[in-house]
Image: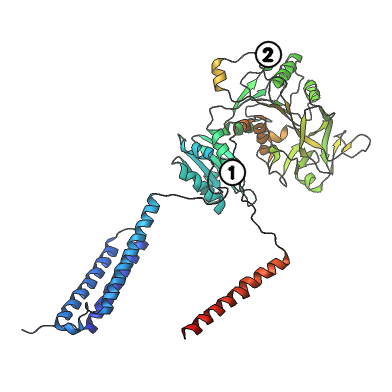
Amino acid sequence: MKTFKFSNKSTKYLLFVGLFLLFMGLSAMAVIGNWEPISLGLIITGIVAIGIWLVLQGNNDLTSPGQAFWGKRSTQAGTNAAFAMLGFVVILGLINFLGNRYNYRLDLTENNLFTLSPETQQLVRNLNQPVKVWIFDQTQSPQDKELLENYRRQGANFSFEYVDPNNNPGLAKKFGVKDVGEVYLEVGEKRQYLQRVREAEPLTEQTITNAIQQIKSDRTAKVYFLQGHGERSLETKDGSLSEAVQALKDKNFQVEPLKLAETKEVPKDATLVVIAAPQQALFEAEVTALKEYQKRGGNLLVTVDKNTKSSGLEPILQDWGIGIDDRIVVNDSEFQVSALGKTAALVSSYGNHPITEGFQNRYSFYPSARAINVVKLIENVKSTPLLLTSEQSWAESNPDQIEFNAESDRQGPLILGIALSRPIESATPQSSPTPNQQNKSDKPLQETRMVVLGNTDFAVDGLFSQQINGDVFLNSISWLSQQDDRLLSISPKEPKNRRLNITTLQASFLSWLSIIIVPFLGLLIAGFMWWRRR
C-alpha cells in the first residue's frame, strides 16, 4: 500500500492560512466587542488549520526520523519560547482582570494631592440617595474629571456627567444655564449652582463637598420678605420679584411674606429678612423689632429705589454708620446711554467680597439707583463696598435736567451696594427654645450681617435674568444666610515647592557633568574592559 506524504513546502502554507484566519477572527472580535458567529468561525477555522499542520508535521517525522521536526533543537527552543510567551500573556491577562475587578489606588505624593480627605470620603460613602454633578461644557478638563472620578470611586450614589449645552438645550434650560462651563449639583428634586469652571478656577474638593453637605442638610434657610408698606410683590405682575423668589426656591430656600405689624416680632426661624423698597415708612414698633432681631444674630437685605424717600429705616442704617443718598445715579458713557439710558448705572467694578467673587469684568446694571454713603465709622462694624460705578457717573440732584453741576451733584465713582457685619451683641433669644429646637439647631451664629443696595429694579421680573443681576441678588442672600457656618473644614492641598535654587555656575557644572564628563568616563571604562579581554 502506497503512503501519501505531504512535503514541508506544501504544509507551511497551511500554517500561514491558520495564523491569518486566527488573527482575522481575533481582530473582528475586538472590533465588534462580542463573540459573533463570523469572528468565532474564523478563530475556530484558524485553530483547526494550525492543528492539522501540527499533525502533518508529526506524520512527516515518522517517515524521516533523522529529520524529525519535533526532535530538532530549534523546534524545542521555539516551543519553549511559545509556551513562555503564552504563560506571560495569561499572567498579564489575569493581572489586568484582577486589577479591574479589585481596583486599588496608592497616592505616593507627599500631601496626598490625589486623595480625598477623610471627611469627604465619609460623606460620599454615607450618601443615602443619588447625587449627580452636571458640567455644562463641551470640553472636559482632565484635572476636574480626575477629581470627580475620585468622588465616584467612594460611593455608588455619586455620579457626574459632561453635557454640551448646544447639543442639549432642553437640559440646559431646565437647569437655567446662562454660560458655558457652569456646574450644577443635583440631589433628588434639588438643584444648586456650584461655579463656572475655567482654566483659572477648576473644581475643588472644598466646593463639591460643602455643596453636598448643604444641599442634603435638613436645615433649610428661610427668607422672609417684609410686606405692608408698598414693597415689591412676590407674585407675578409688573415690577414684582417673582423670578427672584423662584430662583431662591430652586436653591433650596424657603420664602415667606412677613407682615411685621401683625406678628410684632421677626419669627424665630427666620434666616434673614428682605426689605425691598418700602414706599411708606415702617412703624416705630417694626423698626424696634428689626433692631432686636439683629441683636440676636438676624440678617437684613435692604434695597431702595428712586421713590423710597423716608422709609423709617434710618435708625437701623445709622446704627451701621451708613446712609442713602437722595440723588439719582446717572452716567455719561456713550455705550451706556445708547444701551441702557443715562439713568441706568452700569457696573463692572466690584469689591473684594464673597458676594462678588468672580464678578470682575462682568456687567450688572441698576436703573435709577441711589448711592450708599458711609456716614461714619462704627466700632466693630466691618464694611465692604460691593458695587462701584465708573468715574463717568455722578449723583444727579435734578433728574429732569441731567447735566453735571459741581455745586449740587456728586462725582463718581459711587457705591451702589455695601456688605456689613459685626459681632452679635447678644446671642440670647428673647424666648428660650424648646428641647426639640435645641437638638436641631446648629452652632450659634458668630455675627450679624446686613447688605444694603441702592436699587431694587435690577432684581425685578425681566431684569433679574439680564447679565449678572440675578447673581448679585442670589449671592447676597447666600452670604446673609450664613450657610458657611456649616461647611466642613477641608484644607486645600497644594504641592510643596521642591525646586533647587542654584547659581549659574552650578547649573553649568551639572550640564557638563551629565552631558560630557559621565559619558566620557563610561567610554573610558568600556575601552579599558575591552583592552583587558584582549
Q: Nearer the viewer, mark 2 or mark 1?
A: 2
| Residue 138 in view (yes/no) | no
Residue at 22%, 75% (x, y): give it: 53
| Amino acid identity at mark 1 | Val
Where's residue 75, x and y in %?
26, 77
Say left or right for 501 vs 522. right
Kindly check if marks 2 and 1 are in contact, taking CB atoms under 8 A apart as contact.
Answer: no
Res 251 quadrant in image: top right
Q: Earlier in the sequence, mark 2 or mark 1?
A: 1
Residue 177: mark: 1
Does 127 appear above or below 495? above
Does 259 appear above or below 213? above
Say left or right for 105 vs 335. left
Q: CA distance from mark 2 to mark 1?
A: 41 Å
Does 75 appear above or below 101? below
Quadrant into which the N terminus falls: bottom left
Residue annotated with mark 2: 264
**Element type at marker 1?**
loop
| Amino acid identity at mark 2 | Lys
Q: Nearer the viewer, residue 366 or 67?
A: 67
Where's residue 346, x and y in %?
76, 42
Res 96 quadrant in image: bottom left
Number of dots carrying numbers: 2
Q: Nearer the viewer, residue 123 or 27?
A: 123
Say left or right for 141 vs 94. right
